[in-house]
Image: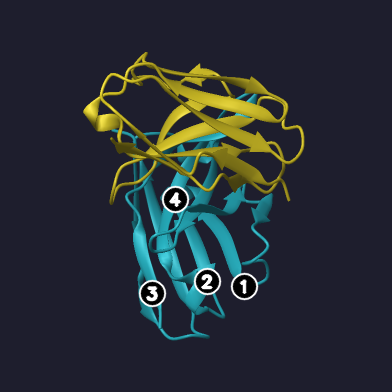
Chain colours: A yellow, B cyan
């Protein structure tokens, strides 16, 4: 199975800060990497698909890049509603895997 | 409105069985792959299973292989997850999701989830 490793597991930041979350795959997955946001008690929400494509309706302060084994999600200016959980997920293999998640907390 | 609504969760004893359902609306269900994803209490997301449009291709995470079966009824716009030999570690919120693709697949529509407790 392809393992996905996110870092950091959590981070503290302030409103307006720029933050980057990274996701590494245990083998090359080309650009088959998706990012999801999850608010407490809610279903995950798709943010980015195919490594760098912003889902419709997602604010432009979110951006993502990467290919192969290394990927990143950047929030250019944190807003209060962004202090939640983020997950990466690979769809390269027939069995999919998520990263362990990154919690973005208010400093 | 594009929507997925799960049902069928509940409390079940270890070794028992349960069938989850997911009702789709607002899109042509038969055109899409579908997935089940779960989240144990306080834990991260775990992909469980995928099924293609005609119900022929199915894939599972190793921990449920041989115990869970994903299926669909396109005439009823419904997805199912038959769970057997349930274990305490299967306790989770189970989400169904629609799978879209742009070169690669991704889950773009999610239900609100249904809770399964094995105890």
Q: Is residue B10 above or below residue A59?
A: below
Instruction: For mark 4, name the chain.
Output: B
Label 2 Cα crowd, 10 Å radius (few <14 / some 14-19 / many 20+): some
Pointers 2 and 1 in contact (C-beta within 8 Å): yes
Q: Is residue B27 above or below residue A63?
A: below
In which quadrant will I find the N terminus of chain B? Answer: top left
x, y (%) of residue A46?
43, 32
x, y (%) of residue A52?
55, 19
Q: Residue at x 68, y 37 (%)?
A: A25
Label 3 Cα crowd, 10 Å radius (few <14 / some 14-19 / many 20+): some
Residue where numbered disc 2 is placed:
B83
Please report whichever mark, 4 or 3, sits nearer to the chain's N-terminal start.
Answer: 4
Q: Residue at x 69, y 49 (%)?
A: B57
Residue B8 in view: no
Please report whichever mark, 2 or 4, sits nearer to the chain's N-terminal start.
Answer: 2
Residue where numbered disc 4 is placed:
B96
- Count of numbered marks: 4
Residue A95 falls left or right of residue A34:
right
């Amino acid at each position: 199975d392809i393992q996905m490793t996110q870092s950091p597991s959590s981070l503290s930041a302030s409103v307006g800060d720029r933050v980057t979350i990274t996701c590494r795959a245990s083998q090359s997955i080309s650009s088959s990497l998706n990012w999801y946001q999850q608010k407490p008690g809610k279903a995950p929400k798709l943010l980015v698909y195919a490594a760098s494509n912003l889902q419709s309706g997602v604010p432009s302060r979110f951006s993502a890049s990467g290919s192969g084994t290394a990927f990143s999600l950047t929030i250019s200016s944190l807003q209060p509603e962004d202090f939640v959980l983020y997950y990466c997920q690979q769809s390269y293999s027939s069995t999919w895997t998520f990263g362990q998640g990154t919690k973005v907390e208010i400093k | 409105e594009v929507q997925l609504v799960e049902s069928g969760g509940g409390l079940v004893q270890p070794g028992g069985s349960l069938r989850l359902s997911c009702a789709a609306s607002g899109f042509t269900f038969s055109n899409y792959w579908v997935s089940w994803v779960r989240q144990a209490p306080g834990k991260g997301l775990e992909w469980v299973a995928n099924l293609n449009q005609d119900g022929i291709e199915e894939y599972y995470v190793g921990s449920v292989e041989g115990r869970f079966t994903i299926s669909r009824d396109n005439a009823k716009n419904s997805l199912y997850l038959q769970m057997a030999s349930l274990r305490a570690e299967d306790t989770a919120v189970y989400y169904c999701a629609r799978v879209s693709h742009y070169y690669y697949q991704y889950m773009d529509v999610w239900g609100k989830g249904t809770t399964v407790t094995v105890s």
